Image (tube, rainbow, N blue to C red):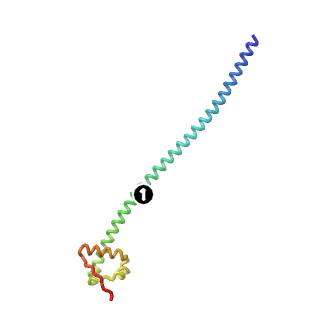
Amino acid sequence: MLRGMITRITRAVKHIKALDEILEALAEEMERSERLERELEREKRLRAELENRLTEFSIALKNRERELKFLKQKISELERELSSVLEASLLKYLQSSKGTLPIKEYIQEYGTTQERIIEALKSLHRKGLIKIAREKEP
């Protein structure tokens, strides 16, 4: 009888030790699982922050593109206006100088480029407002 009790107690102790080992292993797994969950949450927050920054940069880029398009349109408008003013100035100059235009002097006096003057003269010619004739050099 005593021997039977000792055998049962020995078996019970072995079961308890086995359960204790299982609980330790389970505790380690739970700790690893919790650590992984914390890392996953941190990664999720980081991803959300990166997505927000990407969205902000995308919006900023679209705004810059709209701004650039607007500025290009403004530049085109100003170039057309400059051409119109230059044409009017050239026409007035030609009328007051009896149709002659010393280009180098005009450039110095009015601060423009030879290319712009030539384009303006061609435009006036196409509109039929002037005739272009080259002066023969002596």
Quarter placement of the C terminus: bottom left
Give the total number of marks visible in the rendering. Answer: 1
Residue appearing at x 34%, y 81% in the figure = 103
Quarter of the figure with residue 25: top right
Q: In this view, does 96 lie above or below 56?
A: below
Identify the residue at the far right of this view: 2
Specify the quadrant of the image occupied by residue 40.
Answer: top right
**Residue farthest left in this picture:** 128
Residue at (32, 68) in percent of width and height: 80
Point out the residue furthest to the bottom here: 138
Circle 1: residue type:
Arg
Looking at the picture, does residue 3 appear above or below residue 107?
A: above
Determine the residue positioned at 56% across, 42% down. Answer: 42
- Residue 27 appears at what percent x and percent y? 64, 31
Image coordinates of residue 86 in percent, x first then y, are 32, 74
Task: Indicate the secondary structure of the residue bearing disc 1.
Answer: helix
Label 1 Cα neighbours within 10 Å, binned few <14 / some 14-19 / many ≥20? few
64 or 18: nearer the viewer: 18
- Quarter location, residue 41: top right
Identify residue for label 1: 64
Left or right: 52 as drawn, with respect to 88? right
Residue 3 x %, y % = 76, 13
Relative to 48, 8 lies left or right:
right
Q: Quadrant of the N terminus?
A: top right
